[in-house]
Amino acid sequence: MNEFEIKVVEFPAKQLIGIKVRTSMTKAKEDCSALWHSFCPKMQEVEEGPGYGISIMLNAEDFDYWAAAEAPAGAAPAGMEAVTIPAGAYARCTVPNLESIGAGYMFMYQTWLGGQQEWKLNEQAPCFELYPADWNPSMPFDLFMPVKR
């Protein structure tokens, strides 16, 4: 029995505002955690809604990681930039807590993607995490991987 379930969903485009760090697979855990610690106090300047962790791959090792929230109308607050999640098909995987994020991504990219024929990775779109507004590290959240037929 699999620990994770995957469902392919259509996700609407989202205009977000946040901050980013350029990191690598080897430094991601510490860099992304530090980024969230910087961003969380600023979230009320943006929107009191869900948080998004967005990964934009630059090569096999390096990527830009964004901590972001939905953008209100108007200019971005000081020190923040706009980032977009494009509309499209995404494989969604709910993970039970933050400790399980690595296992969730491994399941999606290795076990699920390689174990079915209908979908392949859409390398033109970012993968992202969606954290509920009242989220804490012991609560479940969703991972989204862009896919295409």
Image (tube, rainbow, N blue to C red):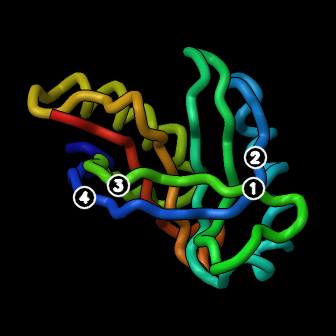
- The circle drawn on residue 81 is 1
Name which residue lies at 76% across and 33% down: 22
Q: Nearer the viewer, residue 29 or 12?
A: 12
Q: Which residue is mark 4?
A: 10
The residues bearing labels 2 and 3 have C-alpha atoms spaced at a distance of: 21 Å
The residues bearing labels 1 and 2 have C-alpha atoms spaced at a distance of: 8 Å
- First along the sequence among labels 2 and 3: 2
Q: Quadrant of residue 149?
A: top left
Q: Quadrant of residue 114?
A: top left
Q: Which residue is mark 3?
A: 87
The residues bearing labels 4 and 1 have C-alpha atoms spaced at a distance of: 25 Å
> Tag 4: Cα neighbours inside 10 Å, few (<14), some, or many (≥20)?
few
- Residue type pointed to by label 3: Ala
On the picture, is 75 further left or further right than 5? Answer: right
Name which residue lies at 60% across and 74% down: 135
Under circle 4, the secondary element is strand
Q: Which residue is mark 2?
A: 20
> Tag 2: Cα neighbours inside 10 Å, few (<14), some, or many (≥20)?
many
CB atoms of marks 2 and 3 within 8 Å:
no
Give the quadrant of the N terminus. top left
- First along the sequence among labels 4 and 3: 4
Q: Nearer the viewer, residue 141 or 71?
A: 71
- First along the sequence among labels 4 and 1: 4
Q: Position of residue 93 (x, y in %)?
A: 35, 52
CB atoms of marks 4 and 3 within 8 Å:
yes
Name which residue lies at 25% across and 43% down: 2
CB atoms of marks 1 and 2 within 8 Å:
yes
The residues bearing labels 1 and 3 have C-alpha atoms spaced at a distance of: 19 Å
- Residue type pointed to by label 4: Glu
The residues bearing labels 4 and 3 have C-alpha atoms spaced at a distance of: 7 Å
The nearer-to-camera label among 1 and 2 is 1
- Residue type pointed to by label 1: Glu
